[in-house]
Image: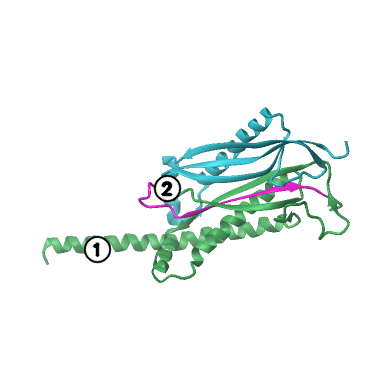
Chain colours: A green, B cyan
Amino acid sequence: MNSDSIGMLFQLVFTVGVGGALLAIGLLAGRWAERRHLASLAQREEELRAMLLTDVRGFPVAAHPGQSVDPSGHARLVTGEAVISSDYFKTFVSALRKIVGGEMKNYQGLLDRARREATVRMLSEARAAGFDSVCNVRYAGYDITSGISGGKKPVVSVAVQAIGTAYRRRGA
Amino acid sequence: MYVVNTESIPGMRIVQIKGLVQGNTVRSKHFGRDFAAGLKNIVGGELKGYTELLTEARRQAVERMLAQAQQLGANAVLNVRFTTSAVTTGAAEMYAYGTAAVVEPATA
C-alpha cells in the first residue's frame, strides 16, 4: 500500500466518521430537544385549558350556557410566533424519504410543534392581558430561512405565526 | 387604539370607516444568527433568533399601520391580516394591513 492510498483511506474514514458523528449527535440531541419541547408544551397547554379558543369570526359563547361576551369593548389582537429547527438526523432521514416519496413524519412533527408553540404564546399573551377567550384564530407559515444561507445549504426549519382576537366572557 | 382581526368589537359600534391602513418592514438576515441557526440545524430545537426576527418585524409593521390609522383620525383597526413576501435572497417583508375605523360604545 503506497502513501497515496493510505491518504485516501484516511480521508474516507474521516468523512464517514464525521457524517456518522453528526447523525448520532442529531439523533440524540434532536430527540432530547423534541422530548423536552413536547413536555413543556403539554404542561403549558394544560395551564391554558380554561381559555376558549376558536377560529370563528364572531365572539362565541354559545357552547357555554349563561355566558355572554363582555361588552366593555375589551378586545385585542394577540399573536404568537415560533421558528423550530430540524436536526441533522431528521434532515438526513427526510432526504432519504424524498427518494421514495411518501409521508414525512419528521417534518410533520416540526410543523406540529411550531404551531402548538405559536398557539401557546398567543394564548399566554391573551391571558397575561386579562382575557379568557381568543377567536378568529389564523395560522400562517413563513419561509424565512430558505433564503438565509444564500441557497447554498438551506437551514431546514419551520416558522409559524398564530393571530387571533382576545376578548372576555361574562359569567365565565 | 383597538386592534382586532375580527370585523367587530364587542360592545362597540362602528361610526365611520376610514379605509385601508398598512404597515410594512423588510428585514434581512444577520450573520451571527445565521451561524447559530446552522449549529441549531444539527441538534434541533427552537431558532430563537429567527423567532425574535419575526416578532420584531410583526411589531414594527403593526406600529406603522397604527400610525397611519392615527393620522386618519381612527381609533380602531379591524380585520387585521399579515402577509410576507420574499424580496431577494435573505430578505423578507412583513406586511400588516387592516381597516381603520372610528368606533364608540354601543350604549352611548
Q: Numbered disc 1: what chain?
A: A
Q: Disc 2 sits on a residue from what chain?
A: A
* Residue B102 or residue A39, whichever sits in front: B102
* Image coords of residue B5 (percent x, y): 69, 46
**Camera-nearest residue between B27 and A81:** B27
The residue at which mark 2 appears reads as A147
Is residue A159 rendered magenta in the image? yes
Q: Is residue A11 left or right of residue B87?
A: left
Q: Residue furthest left?
A: A2
**Which portion, as a residue range, is magenta?**
A149-169
Q: Nearer the viewer, mark 2 or mark 1?
A: 2
> Residue A106, percent across and down?
49, 64
- Residue on which the image places disc 1: A12
Q: Which mark is residue B75?
A: none
Residue nearest the observer in this picture, A21 or A98: A98
Local SS, label 1? helix
Mark 2: amino acid: Gly
Relative vertical location of residue B24 with respect to residue A79 in this rendering, above or below: above
Q: Residues within 10 Å of mark 2 (few under 14, many from 20)?
A: many
Q: Earlier in the sequence, mark 2 or mark 1?
A: 1
- Label 1 amino acid? Leu
Label 2 sits on a secondary structure element that is loop
> What residue is rendered at 64% in x and 52% in y?
A138
